[in-house]
Image (cartoon, helix red, strand yellow):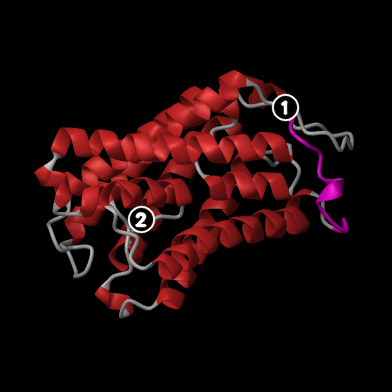
């Protein structure tokens, strides 16, 4: 039965009856989001600092560099989802939280707390990278994202890349972790694999943020925001709008087609 698969995978059950109240989250969920985002940002920024050659953020780097970084995303996210999904839902990303809020899978007050602890976790993870690698990490701004020469530094191009990448990431998340008929035991592999693939494709263009917390942490630590307006457009608005668009699209097409809005969505509980 689908519900048995959900419980076996550690994911909350998706109700089949309409209920407009998403479940309350608590301190354990907030801690889970902080720890998960901290670990995600630390391992990613450390890997970027160690494996991507200095200057690769603004110029092409060997494909092997981004392949390694993509694999780091796969395995880190897989581990975090499998261990923390049952605790917090395993967002680790303000854009994902915005998407889940838009389809009523999390209450706005809990979503706001999630975003705060995710941003704090991102900064903490980047600080640990700086503390451990010091000059080694400084060459790549401690894993900071940035629009590369392949896009001619265009803010709108960065926005489009981050929008598209986050759209497909959240499309996978909703499909495998929210849909009531999904094989949720595969969620960690599917979501981690999707993110790793997207990183391999798009990292040469923007660094493949797809996550405002992942972008914010190293930007704070290195002081490299790449121009405030550009950073906001490409690495905050791009992921958030892409995530919400994906959540709505999947909802309308596959979960409850024909509904007028997310008020018809059966919340997690």
Question: Does 152 appear above or below 59?
Answer: below
Horizontal and vertical percent position of residue 138: 16, 49
Where residue 179 sits: x, y (%)?
A: 70, 42
Residue nearest the observer in this picture, 246 or 139: 139
Q: Can residue 180 be seen in this snapshot? A: no
Q: Quadrant of the N terminus?
A: top right
Left or right, 84 with reference to 5: left
Of residue 209 and residue 258, the one placed in the foreground of this image is: 209
Q: Quadrant of residue 242?
A: bottom right
Look at 86% across and 38% down and name the residue there.
Answer: 20
Point 63% across, 49% down: residue = 98
Based on the picture, tell me whether residue 268 belongs to the magenta stretch.
Answer: yes
To which residue does mark 1 refer? 13
Instruction: Decide: few, some or many residues near mark 1? Use Cα within 10 Å; few <14, some 14-19, many ≥20.
Output: some
For residue 80, which quarter of the picture? top left
Q: Indicate whether 176 appears above or below 59.
A: above
Badge number at residue 199 = 2
Please tell me whether mark 1 sits on a helix, a strand or a loop.
loop
Q: Is residue 260 left or right of residue 225?
A: right
Answer with mark 2 or mark 1, whichever residue precedes in sequence. 1
Point out residue 143 in the picture as x, y percentages from the top left corner.
Answer: 26, 50
- Left or right of 31? Residue 178 is right
Q: Which residues are magenta?
A: 258-269
């Amino acid at each position: 039965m689908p519900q048995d698969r959900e419980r076996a995978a550690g994911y909350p059950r998706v109700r089949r009856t309409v209920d407009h109240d998403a479940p309350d989250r608590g301190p354990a969920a907030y801690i889970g989001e902080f720890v998960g985002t901290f670990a995600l940002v630390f391992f990613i920024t450390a890997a970027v600092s160690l494996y991507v050659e200095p200057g690769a953020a603004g110029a092409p780097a060997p494909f092997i560099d981004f392949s390694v970084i993509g694999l780091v995303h796969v395995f880190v996210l897989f581990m975090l989802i499998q261990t923390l999904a049952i605790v917090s839902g395993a967002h680790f990303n303000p854009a994902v939280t915005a998407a889940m809020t838009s389809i009523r899978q999390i209450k706005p007050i809990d979503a706001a707390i999630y975003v705060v602890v995710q941003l704090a976790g991102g900064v903490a993870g980047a600080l640990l990278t700086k503390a451990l690698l010091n000059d080694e990490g400084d060459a790549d701004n401690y894993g900071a994202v940035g629009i590369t020469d392949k896009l001619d530094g265009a803010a709108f191009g960065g926005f489009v890349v981050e929008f598209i990448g986050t759209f497909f990431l959240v499309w996978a998340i909703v499909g495998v972790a929210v849909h009531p008929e999904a094989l949720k035991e595969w969620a960690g592999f599917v979501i981690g694999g999707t993110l790793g693939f997207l990183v391999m494709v798009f990292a040469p263009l923007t660094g493949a943020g797809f996550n405002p917390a992942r972008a914010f942490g190293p930007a704070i630590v290195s002081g490299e925001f790449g121009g405030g307006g550009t950073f906001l457009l490409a690495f905050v608005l791009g992921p958030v709008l892409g995530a919400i668009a994906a959540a709505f699209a999947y909802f309308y097409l596959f979960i409850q087609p024909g509904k007028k809005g997310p008020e018809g969505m059966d919340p997690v509980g």
